[in-house]
Image (tube, rainbow, N blue to C red):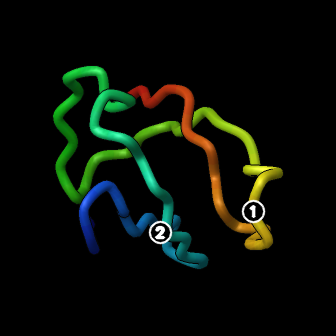
Amino acid sequence: SQVAHEKYKFSDGKDTIIIEIDDEDWGGLSVGPDETITIYGEVDGNTLRANEIDVKRITK
């Protein structure tokens, strides 16, 4: 679910993470709350928060 501009909450049913996804990184993909997606990225080394992900690509 979207929690703020370019910030989204994802859960695998056990754990939850908040990820910032720039609008252009969606690549026109439309995703519903019950769809499974794969997020490709890396932990952002430029921040003190270890759970910040730099998203590169998203696929269904």
Depth-wise, is mark 1 or mark 2 nearer the camera? 1
Q: Secondary structure at mark 1?
A: loop
x and y, in percent, of residue 11 in the image: 47, 69
Q: Residue furthest front?
A: 46
Write down the quadrant of residue 59 in the picture.
top left
Q: Against 47, is 56 above or below?
A: above
x and y, in percent, of residue 14 in the image: 58, 78
Task: Tell me which residue sits at (75%, 62%) in the image.
Answer: 47
Q: Against 43, is 12 above or below?
A: below
Asked if labels 2 and 1 touch by Cβ distance under 8 angstroms, the answer is no
Left or right: 3 as drawn, with respect to 15: left
Q: Quadrant of the N terminus?
A: bottom left
Write down the quadrant of residue 7 in the picture.
bottom left
Query: Which residue was labeled with disc 1?
Result: 47
Write down the quadrant of residue 16 in the picture.
bottom right
Amino acid type for the residue under numbered disc 2:
Ser
Left or right: 32 as drawn, with respect to 49: left
Task: Tell me which residue sits at (28%, 47%) in the image.
Answer: 35
For disc 2, the neighbor class at 10 Å (few under 14, some 14 to 19, many from 20) is: few
For disc 1, the neighbor class at 10 Å (few under 14, some 14 to 19, many from 20) is: few
Query: Which residue was labeled with disc 2?
Result: 11
